[in-house]
Image (tube, rainbow, N blue to C red):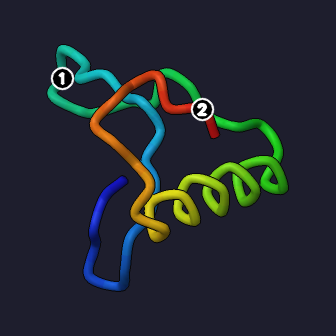
Amino acid sequence: IIEGKSGVFIAMPSRKTRAGEYKDVAHPIHPEFRAELQKRILDMYDSGNVQDDPGVEL
């Protein structure tokens, strides 16, 4: 979850290339799935129920 100038958004996992650019290593194929994924993640984030635990189920 990243806080940008126009609000928070989710970023997909990425890796830095030898050229110094960041490329996504995973991303949703369908825009509908991306929207649903982002909605669920941000709803959980906004609710304050997120702990520093990588095992949190959404």
Image quadrant where residue 48 sits: bottom left
Residue 50 located left or right of residue 38: left
Q: Position of residue 39 (x, y in %)?
A: 65, 63
Q: Label 1 belongs to which residue? A: 19
Image quadrant where residue 58 sits: top right
Specify the amino acid type for callout 1: Ala
Relative vertical location of residue 35 with respect to residue 53 in this rendering, above or below: below
Spatial separation of the CA atoms under disc 1 and disc 2: 35 Å
Dot 1 or dot 2, earlier in sequence: 1
Q: Label 2 belongs to which residue? A: 57
Label 1 SS: loop
> How many labels, in total?
2
Q: Position of residue 30 (x, y in %)?
A: 82, 45
Label 2 SS: loop
Residue lying furthest top in this view?
18
> Neighbour class for label 1 at 10 Å: few (<14), some, many (≥20)?
few
Residue shown at 68% from the left, 49% from the top: 37
Q: Where is residue 41 in the image (x, y as percent from the top left)?
A: 56, 53
Specify the amino acid type for callout 2: Glu
Relative vertical location of residue 33 with respect to residue 13 in this rendering, above or below: below
Residue 2, numbered label: none
Foreground tag (1 vs 2): 2
Residue shown at 38% from the left, 70% from the top: 8
Q: Where is residue 24 in the image (x, y as percent from the top left)?
A: 45, 30
Instruction: Tell which of 50 and 27 is nearer to you.
Output: 50
Residue 28 located left or right of residue 42: right
